[in-house]
Image (cartoon, helix red, strand yellow):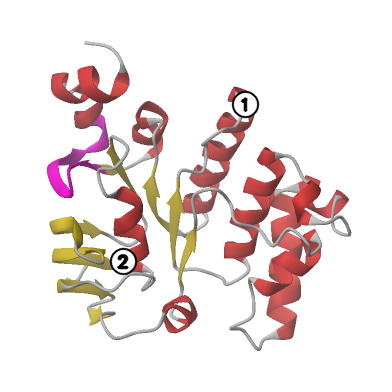
Amino acid sequence: MAALLELRQVHAGYGPLEVLRGVSLRVEEGQIVTLIGANGAGKSTTLMTISGLIRARSGEVLYGGVSLRQAAPHQIVALGLCQVPEGRRVFAELTVLENLELGAYTRRDRAGVAGDLEQVCELFPRLRERAGQKAGTLSGGEQQMLAIGRALMARPRLLLLDEPSLGLAPVLVQRIFAVIRELNQRGTTILLVEQNANEALQIAHRGYVMETGRIALEDQAGALLRNPQVREAYLGYE
């Protein structure tokens, strides 16, 4: 049976710089899979290649068994594969509500969009409170909630999260990880890139360790938490 998402020996990069050097990974439907590694390992480049923002030079990106190599980013979103980028990247001059509505730009089911907007506001009550406020005036934690909520408005089957806890206070980090777990329990498959390897592996089903553009290790998340190499290099203890 085909995985929901599969990368097969993907090479990609920027100009003459090759960042991904034969990356292969799988994400099964219903899973949380996390991709951990040092800064510059190629984690964000992997997500951008999946999203079509960077073109794979060779190899295959398969979604539901179908190649995404020639698909444009907006077509990939319409297929139900959405990315929350590192750094949130909300539209600062638009209101919270306008940002959320933009997340549904590929959809035509108005009733469904209205229902999903209500669900996002139930998940993040602060967004309802800030609906008319410009996104650029929100706190970092509120902007992260907005970025996730905007992606959810596309009703994703697979959600790509790039460093969702970056720069947040510890209490907000716990909230974000609780939301990720809840979204997965509701049926959304998630590929999570995260510097906080301990928290990521605590909620993930499986994990991959990336080093210099290659997958160095893969295993069940619990096994990676117990792996001495991972514990020393990424979890901060032996």
> Mark 2 falls on what kind of element?
helix
Vertically, is 145 above or below 172?
Answer: below
Reply yes or no: does residue 174 show up in magenta. Answer: no
Mark 1 sits on what residue?
Answer: 169
Element type at marker 1?
loop
Where's residue 175, x and y in %? 61, 35
In the picture of the structure, the residue carrying the numbered disc 2 is: 49
Q: Residues within 10 Å of mark 1 (few under 14, many from 20)?
A: few
Is disc 2 surrounded by few (<14), some (14 to 19) or many (20+) residues within 10 Å?
many
Q: Nearer the viewer, residue 186 or 196?
A: 196
Task: Give the residue at x 72% y 72%.
Answer: 101
Taking depth in this image into account, of 8 and 202 the one nearest to the observer is 8
Examine the residues drawn in magenta and state their main secondary structure: strand
Specify which label sits upstream in the sequence, 2 or 1.
2
Vertical side of 54 occupied by 234: above or below: above
Please tell me which residue is depicted at 64% across the width and 80% down the height of the picture.
105
Q: Quadrant of the C terminus?
A: top left
Disc 2 to disc 1, C-alpha distance: 30 Å
Q: Check residue 222 in the rendering and tell me which mark sits there, or answer none.
A: none
User: In this image, 201 relative to 65: left or right?
Assistant: right
**Amino acid of disc 2:** Thr
Considering only vertical position in the picture, is 175 above or below 34? above
Please provide the residue range marked out in magenta. 207-222
Q: Residue 53's spot in the image, x, y percent? A: 39, 71
**Residue 187 placement, left or right of 17:** right
Quadrant of the rendered structure where residue 132 is? bottom right
Q: Position of residue 147 (x, y in %)?
A: 62, 55
Give the amino acid type for the residue marked by disc 1 in the picture. Answer: Ala
